[in-house]
Amino acid sequence: MPSAVKEALAQAKSGDGALAEWLAHKEAYMRTGACFGLMRGHPERLSNEVVGWFVGIGMFSDDLQSIARVIKRERHTGCGPFIVDAFVAGVLADVPLMKRQWKSIETIVDRIGEVPASLIEVLPIGLQSDRSLPRGVALRLAQRRGADAIPTIEAAVAGAEGKARKRLTEALATLRPSKLKSASAEPAAELLPVLIEAWSESRHDALGDTIVSLGQSLKRPALSAKSKGELEAAWLALAAQRDPGDVNRLLDTPWPGAWKTALTRVNALAAFPSDPRVSRGLAEAALKYRSMGSAPLHRALAVVLSRVADPGSADAIKQIVATRYHNKDDYQRALNAIARVVKAPRAAPSAELLDQVASLLDASTDVDALWNAVWDDPADLGARLVLADALQQNGDPRGEFISLQCIDDPPRKTTTRANKLLKANIDPWTGPLPAVERASRVFERGFLTRLRITASGKEVAAALKHKEWRTVEELTVDRWRSDNIGPLLSRMPSLRAFYARVESLDAIAKHGPFPSVRVLGVLPEPVREPLSAFPHLEVLAGTWLDWNLTVKKCRAVLQQPKRLGLRGLVVRHLRVGIFNQPEWTIFYRNYRALSPAGTVSLEMTGDGKWRLRAPGWRIHLTPEDVTVGWHGGGKWNPKMPRALLAPFQDITSKRVCVPVRGKTGAAALEQLKKDLPAGVEIVSEPLKLLID
């Protein structure tokens, strides 16, 4: 502690000086308020050193970490380095830290503009933390400090053991990515800078497409980390190398949800030479950020796109202009720059150079043919396995993922590995599909099979060419009007289940027929007309009975299977439960009276979302038997089976399905055997649904 600070502290202990009030406060929030006063210069203005140290000490009791926010908002900079010094002294003295104190220090460092040298001493402590937030902050600070931080971390590795040693070693590997790469041995990587330079002079389409293909042929490992902070630090460290061979894996790394973090990535990519891969990747990434607040990000994106002026990214930019009201002028300038390039005379690339690239792309051309075989016949499992083998030989993790998901009844270890690969690569594997709800994506047999979109008609029209649609088996359009979705359905040969609002069916039907669709979900009213656009429809699903259930509405719903020639009906969000609401009785009484063809499947979910496979309780009902099933959604309620079976006293064949999952599932089965009346069959397997 500096002598000036010691002197001020001694005066405060004796009750003299401006810091006496600060020291007198025992409550944390009162001391934090006193810190605000010190920074603002009352009761009297003190030196930055004294203020910084006392504010830094106060941060160790600031449970809300509001001091850093005030420093950022009021732009206090003079005391910043001394706050960091106080933090370093506290960490070295093993003073307990607040939950987000490392993040607050990063905020103060941002305000200072550089990482103080004193902070290097405690970076290894942050990198060894059991919490991801301190590790991520320490890694970013070490990366900003550069080579100066490496010796201190290396010294800490020598004295560390176990997890701490592993974390420090991983941090060093991130700070020195050049040691992990074998780029110099790749002929394609050596040729890329030559091609990029030639393209920047001519902007020729053929050369741009060649650069994209050559970049995809590089099989460098994808970036991965245990936390978002560590991933961003690794990403920025890799981008700082400005290696053209890394552009593809930088763009393939999942983009962050926060636009401010994405802006940091855009600024890093802007430092690369003009590259068609960068412009096309950024144009696709721009579609992910739709909020009004992301305008600064879109301005930065438009600046990069204008500078690169890649004719190959024009279609993607037009899609942005069509879907985003704000920043239209920014993107229009990018389109104008591309138009000027297209109109100007462009020299053809060297034939010798293109021949050299072609020799390197022979292997990747074979892989492209295997991809096309899957897109042409998505149902051919053999084509997927052949593609998986080729991708694994090229070091592409997608190959391993496809192989793992094609295993029948995989063990837990296999499923865990597949989920890990999917989590790290789900965004690039989803492809540039518009307005996809991230949580709705499901992959089966290595490809996207289920998703929900909120895209407008213009967005869908601009994305019709993407081949990722061809493996989708279940599509939900969560939009008030989805009239323009018809052309998309005709390009989805694998589609089995489609959900949209009933008002849009007439407009969608004009683009039919859609023979692959077996399940149709509608909202909010029953279908009034025959569905000739869906000739092979088997099951009608919907949410009709959420409120104001009447006998008339109930009969209208139940008459549909017989009138439309269907084998089943799925009714969702029927209000039923342990409170004996009358909906079950009304629905069941009319069901027995009308006796519709096929099985009627009723679903009850607790999450309120319109999703046909939402977890929770489900019921299969026929005139002869009733089956109740629980699929693990929400909290297990042992009273629910009896309550759900109560309206069906006159049906003698009753069954309850509860999948056994460890000790909890076994205990649930034993409890049900005691609680349910005799004659109810209890089985430990999932309930088979109409839509499966």
Image (cartoon, rainbow, N blue to C red):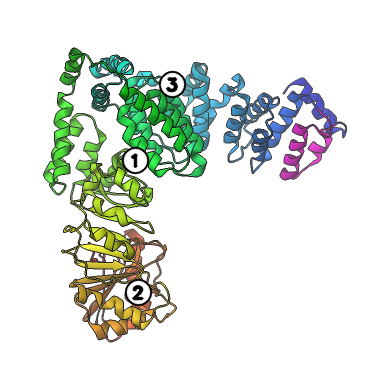
Q: Which mark is residue 567?
A: none
Foreground: disc 3 or disc 1: 3
- Find residue 171 and report its horizontal and vertical position in percent: 44, 26
Quadrant placement of the N terminus: top right
Q: Residues within 10 Å of mark 3 (few under 14, many from 20)?
A: few
Q: Is residue 431 above or below residue 494?
A: above
Q: Which segment did they paint magenta?
A: 18-45
Instruction: Check disc 2 and report its element: helix, strand or loop.
Output: helix
- Find residue 536 and report its horizontal and vertical position in percent: 16, 64
Q: Which mark is residue 641?
A: 2
Q: Residues within 10 Å of mark 1 (few under 14, many from 20)?
A: some
Left or right, 579 with respect to 14, comes to left
The residue labelled by disc 3 is 271
Query: Is 30 one of the magenta-colored residues?
Result: yes
Picture residue at 71% right of the left edge, 33% below the top: 55
Question: Could you give the CA–CA distance between mark 1 and mark 2, rounded to whole angstroms?
Answer: 40 Å
- In-front residue for pair 487/418: 487
Q: Which mark is residue 427?
A: 1
Instruction: Check disc 3 and report its element: helix, strand or loop.
Output: loop
Query: Is 673 one of the magenta-colored residues?
Result: no
The quarter of the picture where residue 537 lies is bottom left
